[in-house]
Amino acid sequence: MLSISPSRTFKALMSCALIAFATIGHAQQVFRITAIPDESPTELARKAVPLVKYLEKQLGMKVEWTPVTDYAAAVETLVNKKVDLAWFGGFTFVQANHRSGGKVLPLVQREEDEKFRSVFITSDPAIKSLADLKGKDVSFGSQSSTSGHLMPRSFLLQNGLNPDKDFKRVAFSGAHDATIAAVASGKVQAGALNISVWEKFVADKKVDTSKVRVIYTTPPYFDYNWTVHADMPAAQREKLTQALLSLSKATPEGKEILDLQRATRFVPTKAENYKGIEAAAVNAALL
């Protein structure tokens, strides 16, 4: 019979334990980020590449991009701490704040998000104002989108239009670029979306502005932000915040990241900034 000494057994067990501990420790050193899928998966992944590389250097750990299938999944992954950092719209932040019992913290937003806007677009020559949308097929983005649904709906209500009663059909495209495509192809007569996506499509000549045009631009409101779970250690939270605030167009790296994020720069934000969006969600019976 083969004999194994107790000391050798102990050493073997200790070696396995150390390997397992090292493996767990390494796994814990992965910092995961996600974003609401307000654009196509390929576009979101493309935008994430330089940011991931930058954060790896700034945080001194591996950073991974973690795509999600829909807005609700983005909320749940952060609330359940499956990711460490999430790019939310104002409404998804409000949803995550409610869902977590106040356990999420917005760190920074783009300077542009202090006065964000939505646009209504159409390819129908007869539509010249919001009032002309009555009896028409109109598309929003995702149901949980701030700039593609909640705030456009809120401003419609303020202008005396109830989408569920006054429109022939309400559609949800799922993303801002998909809304543009739906309007351009004639699937719907009009749509509402994020102004920065619209401006990017116009600048890149991805939409024929002789056929698709803006009929209404909303008043400004607070929108997107980078949010973390409140359980993140304060030191890591501060390091992350400073990394994002330090991005500058004066450097090639900073310019690439900020341009992809359609940002001039990132500025500090706070939960109180989104009280107006919360009130709009309650008023529209979406929260």
Image: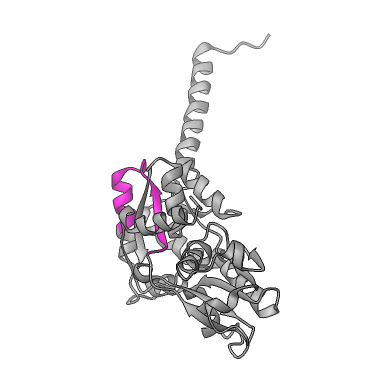
Residue 81 position (above or below residue 182)? above
Which residue is at 51% across, 74% downward? 197
Q: Tell whether position 217 is magenta.
A: no
Nearest the camera: 284 or 60? 284
> Depth check: 164 or 183 in front?
164
Q: Nearer the viewer, residue 36 or 67?
A: 36
Residue 67 in view: no
Q: Residue at x 63, y 87 (%)?
A: 125
From this viewpoint, which residue is outermost toward the top? 1
Q: Is residue 4 left or right of residue 287?
A: right
Q: Quadrant of the N terminus?
A: top right
Q: Is residue 38 above or below residue 270?
A: below
Task: Please tell me how many numbered marks the rendered image carries.
Answer: 0
On screen, residue 132 above or below 270:
below
Q: Position of residue 116 (x, y in %)?
A: 40, 70
Indicate yes or no whether the magenta region holds residue 226: yes
In the image, residue 64 sits, relative to residue 122, either above or below, namely above
> Residue at 33% of width from left, 72% of height from top?
248
Q: Which range of residues does the magenta coloring cover?
A: 222-241
Quarter-of-image position of residue 241:
bottom left
Residue 235 position within the rendered picture, expressed as x and y whole percent measured from the top left:
29, 46
Left or right of 242 on screen, residue 56: right
Residue 201 locus on image (x, y percent): 55, 80
Q: How is the image coloured?
A: one colour
Whether residue 130 is visible, yes or no, is: yes
